[in-house]
């Protein structure tokens, strides 16, 4: 393994790597992300980066917290970008470590543009996004040929912390069989109401995956009509991914973590075999 890592490029002095740490568990870190951790002088990390990931940083590396969490005191985005530029200009080898993927609702694009404007060289290292990897860990595929051939990823709140007005909820409700929402737990009631008002059935399956892929992962299965009340009753907490669509029913067959704990998996949760759609 060490020989393989050493063949990969490392961070050069004065460079910034924007790296995705994946949805949570250390095992989903990419090899290039690991290489960055072992060659960085400074690791500027987000709130959703697992502490076990940070333990992989080379001995002596400086760890700087720059987390942003809704409703809590957080670093300002311009200050984070400025700090990356400052560190690079000092000749440091800088790793900007973000949960999930830096370009999927991670503001990595904004930080990269700041580096471009400052003339700082950088590398993008993608990570597994929670909207795909986190759902997979919960036994929910975002696509399945018996359910959908399209999926929409969206954020549940805008820069002001409210449900985004720029999203065409009617179009999404009518055109996207599966909707995956980041940062939507706080506004799940008005979002569900908008989708139902636009024509989605109140009985349509919904799943909330909290703290995806980690040891404290929780999964709440519900429906559009009852998900807001179920979230309150369950006490499920962010960070969480919300998914709407028939693919949620597949969890009855694909909950591999549940199977490890003895859950009996259903062979045909969609009833497609009975409908003659097995070819």
Image: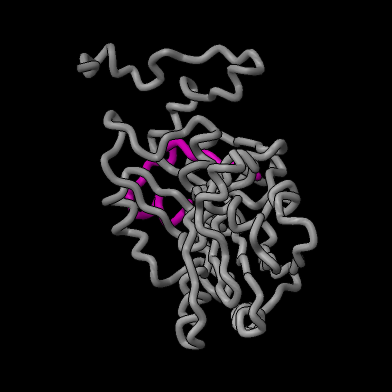
Percent position of residue 230, x then y: 62, 40
- Please identify the quarter of the rendering in which residue 3 is found: top right
Determine whether 68 is above or below 53 in the image. Answer: below
The number of numbered badges drawn on the structure is: 0
Q: Residue at x 54, y 36 (%)?
A: 222
Determine whether 274 is above or below 162 in the image. Answer: above
The residue lying toward the viewer, choosing from 241 and 78, is 78
What colouring style does the render use? one colour
Asked if residue 43 is among those painted magenta in the image, a careful observer would answer: no
From the viewer's perspective, is 42 left or right of 277? right
The residue lying toward the viewer, choosing from 276 and 69, is 69
- Please identify the quarter of the rendering in which residue 194 is found: bottom left
From the viewer's perspective, is 28 left or right of 71? left
Percent position of residue 165, x then y: 43, 71
Percent position of residue 162, x then y: 55, 69
- Please identify the quarter of the rendering in which residue 49 is found: bottom right
Q: Quadrant of the N terminus?
A: top right
Residue reaching furthest bottom? 118
Does residue 179 appear in the picture of this structure?
Answer: yes
From the viewer's perspective, is 3 left or right of 140? right
Q: Residue at x 46, y 69 (%)?
A: 164
Determine whether 97 is above or below 210 in the image. Answer: below
Percent position of residue 273, x then y: 28, 13
Does residue 69 appear in the picture of this structure?
Answer: no
Q: Residue at x 72, y 54 (%)?
A: 54
Magenta-highlighted residues: 192-211
């Amino acid at each position: 393994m060490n020989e393989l890592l050493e063949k990969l490029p490392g961070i050069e002095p004065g460079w910034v790597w924007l790296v995705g740490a994946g949805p949570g568990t250390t095992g989903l870190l990419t090899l290039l992300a690991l290489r960055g951790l072992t060659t960085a002088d400074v690791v500027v990390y987000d709130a959703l980066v697992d502490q076990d990931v940070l333990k992989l940083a080379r001995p002596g590396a400086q760890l700087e917290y720059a987390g942003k969490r809704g409703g809590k005191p957080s670093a300002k985005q311009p200050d984070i970008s400025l700090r990356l530029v400052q560190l690079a200009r000092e000749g440091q080898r800088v790793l900007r470590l973000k949960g999930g993927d830096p370009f999927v609702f991670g503001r990595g694009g904004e930080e990269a543009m700041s580096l471009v404007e400052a003339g700082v060289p950088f590398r993008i290292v993608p990570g597994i996004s929670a909207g795909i990897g986190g759902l997979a860990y919960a036994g929910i595929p975002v696509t399945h040929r018996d359910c959908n051939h399209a999926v929409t990823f969206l954020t549940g709140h805008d820069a002001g912390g409210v449900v985004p007005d720029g999203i065409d909820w009617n179009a999404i409700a009518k055109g996207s069989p599966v909707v995956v929402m980041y940062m939507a737990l706080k506004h799940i009631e008005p979002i569900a109401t908008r989708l139902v008002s636009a024509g989605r059935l109140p009985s349509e399956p919904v799943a909330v995956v909290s703290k995806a892929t980690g040891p404290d992962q929780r999964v709440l299965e519900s429906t559009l009509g009852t998900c807001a009340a179920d979230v309150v009753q369950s006490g499920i907490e962010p960070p969480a991914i919300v998914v709407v669509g028939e693919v949620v029913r597949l969890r009855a067959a694909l909950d591999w973590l549940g199977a490890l704990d003895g859950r009996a998996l259903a062979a045909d949760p969609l009833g497609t075999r009975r409908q003659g759609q097995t070819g």
